[in-house]
Image (cartoon, rainbow, N blue to C red):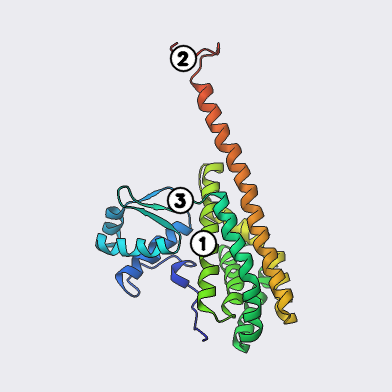
Amino acid sequence: MTRNWTEPYLGVYREPEGSVRDSLSDHAEVHLKWRVLNGAFVSGEKIREAALAKELDISRATIREATRRLAGAGLVEIDAQRGVFVRTYTLEQIEDISEIRRALCSLTASSFVSRATPTDRARITDLFDRLEAADGRAYEPADYVLGLLFNEAVVRAANNERLFTLYHEAWQQMRIFKLFLRRHVFGAVDVQAHNHSMFSQGAVHRRTLYQAVLSGKEGDIAEAMRRSADHSLLRAQEQFVDYLAATQSTWREKIVSTRTPSGNPAGG
């Protein structure tokens, strides 16, 4: 069944407006997801339900409903005793998620070939043409969104809602992992710099995927998607190495700072 997807999918791509869009729980979910995926809340950080409920002028029960949804998408984790926290992933878990994403590439490609409509293909071409036009000027924040929409337009054209959900959730989980690493390497999350980097790195993969779509060959589409997934995982692994170096350096500095110039423990 073809679904009429909208670009601001659950508030991921555009900052949510102040007004309630659908239901109160939808409204809360949009705000929470936006903040998690844009680094306002990072992995391990507690989401304070009372403060958020007051800010959005809704009940804590509504906030809890929204956090339950995000827990189902793998963005937050709920501890009955401690509260709600942004989900923390290990590198091994991210590698497992990437393996599943790779496996989905073949199914996406076969479904695309058999189910993509002329409208789907026209949308993909329109988005790619807009991306190519963006290459002739200075980068703008909206370009990153355009790149995301292009990649997801290909998956959406498979016209399998569950498949799209799995793809979308895997992307979100990878993103919060990378934002967590950036926070610990650089001391802050510069989301715009991160987005710019991701957009630039994805240019070659987008062109390869578009050429595969034009070819109409299932194998080419699957391989192009796998290469993109592999590149994303490789970047996560490289960033994890930087994270280990940064956190170990911080630990050593703390040990050194507790010693006197003579090397004896301070106060000893």
Local secondary structure at mark 2: loop
Mark carried by residue 224: none
Q: Amino acid at mark 3?
A: Val
Q: Is residue 238 left or right of residue 163?
A: right
Q: Amino acid at mark 1?
A: Gln
Local secondary structure at mark 3: loop
Residue at label 1? 172
Above/below status of 84 relative to 100? above
Q: Is residue 99 left or right of residue 13?
A: right
Residue at label 2? 266
Mark carried by residue 42: 3
Of mark 2 and mark 1, the one earlier in the sequence is 1
Q: Are marks 2 and 1 in contact (CB under 8 Å)?
A: no
Give how far across and how far down residue 177 sits, in percent: 53, 53
Give how far across and how far down residue 223 sits, in percent: 72, 69
Residue in the foreground of this view, choosing between 43 and 138: 43
Question: What's the residue at 49%, 78% (across, down)?
Answer: 6
Q: Which quarter of the picture shows residue 95?
A: bottom right
Local secondary structure at mark 1: helix
Above/below status of 261 relative to 156? above
Q: Which quarter of the picture shows residue 203?
A: bottom right
Of mark 3 and mark 2, the one earlier in the sequence is 3
Give how far across and how far down residue 215 sits, in percent: 75, 81
